[in-house]
Image (cartoon, helix red, strand yellow):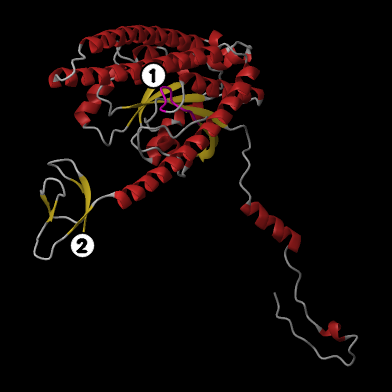
Amino acid sequence: MSSSVVVASATADDSWRGVDVGSPPPYSVQDQIWDTAKQSLPSVPPEKPLVIAVMGPTGTGKSTLISKLAGREMNIGHNLSSCTQECEEVPCKVGDKYVILVDTPGFNDTERSDTEILYSLAEWMKDSYDDDILLSGIIYLHSISDARMTNSSLQNLRMFRKLCGDDNLKNVILVTTKWGITPEEDAHRRERDLTSENGFWGTMIAAGSSVRRFENSNASAKSLVEDILYGGQRFMPKIQEEVVQGKKLADTEAGAFINDALNNLQEKYQEEKEALTEEVKLAERSRKCQLFPGNTIMTSRCLENQRMQEALKRECRRLERQVAEKEEEQRILHMDYVEALQNRIQMYAEKEVEQREQHTNNVEALQNRIKRLEESKKKMPRVKLGFWHLNWKCLVCKRKHPNEGCWTCPNCGFVQENVY
């Protein structure tokens, strides 16, 4: 572009004619703005993204795997409580493919019942089908650091098979995690136990499931999904088929599995409750027989028996609550879809109110405790340190105590405060 030169003009009105504006720009300002906007906008996938569900027990590394694939941090738990409460969709790009990763909650959760989790999964399956979204594959995680297959892990695996359906096992990748924190020899032995013909994964592998390792790296995470990205086909898991057909959750295979487990738990709790009730009755009769005024030994036994009786009653009340909770879960299982959603809304509202009330009660309890401590401190007998004494002495038994402040005499149990 040539430089602009201003040439003087005789008249003010024609002064602009002496300006050399140079050669025209290669494209308009509007074109420049549009190009800048296109660079800042996210690229739009040319085709439907592939949907991959990540499933497994709590603490196996589902959120960690998704973080590696998505290239950004997820809510990762580092304790015994679960950090994934609902199905969470995470869009990302792996290679040249657009992918939606679905982070699912594990069963046997620390805060939610299996019925709630199953409803959450069923709800997502139904909504995704209505939006014409089907899975292209499922990744199921298992921690190789577990010394044995725990009851929780086994229940998760059985529930997973009910959710997926045996016909869809060929679309499943079974992944072992936490290799970096497990001794190599132990890890290989546990992997053989899982994948052998008679192992926990044996029938799934025979039905077409593949086995991989996740070594907590981006490259390892991407290699897990290559078969799904370039060879997977869209399919409907068993639970999605059943929900779309309009079945109640109790009539699905996964719901029936939970219902059977609830029945077994109810029977177990009822048996424990009946046994505890008998123990409470025996304790009451025993306490009546041991009331011997003036006999220190028998009185002590009676008090111990009374404490045991109160503990048994507390345990009975706990079992009653658990039986009631399982009955409520069974009732929810037999609801239809709309009624179940309304029940969940009501349940969340009640939980919110309960948490708010609990917070208020905790604050009031702390305030009352502070008030009682301040009042007791005012009423507490004070022991002054004498000029020639090196220690304070108990007001009752005269036992020495070297430290300033409130203290309970270990000899006589008298509470007092040492002051200067």
Amino acid bearing label 2: Tyr
Which residue is denoted by mark 2 in the rendering? Answer: 420
First-in-chain label (2 vs 1) = 1
Q: Which residue lies furthest to the front in this view?
A: 294
Q: Which of 102 and 224 is in front in this view?
A: 102
Which range of residues does the magenta coloring cover?
103-110
The chief SS type of the magenta part is loop
Amino acid bearing label 1: Arg
For residue 224: magenta?
Answer: no
Residue 150 seen by the camera: no
Q: Which residue is drawn at 47% across and 35% down?
A: 358
In this rendering, which labeled residue sits more in front, label 2 or label 1?
2
Measured from the top left, where is residue 408 in percent x and y?
A: 20, 45
Q: In which quarter of the image is the C terminus?
A: bottom left
Q: In this view, does 194 lie to the left or right of 219?
A: left
Q: In what element is the residue under mark 2?
A: loop
Which residue is denoted by mark 1 in the rendering? Answer: 318
Mark 2: few, some, or many residues within 10 Å (few <14, many ≥20)?
Answer: few
Q: Residue furthest bottom?
A: 10
Measured from the top left, where is residue 81 in percent x and y?
A: 39, 32
Q: Is residue 67 left or right of residue 197?
A: right
How far apart are the alpha carbons under marks 2 and 1?
Answer: 51 Å
Q: Nearer the viewer, residue 264 or 249?
A: 264
For residue 104: magenta?
Answer: yes
Q: In which quarter of the image is the N terminus?
A: bottom right
Q: Which residue is drawn at 36% across and 40% down?
A: 217
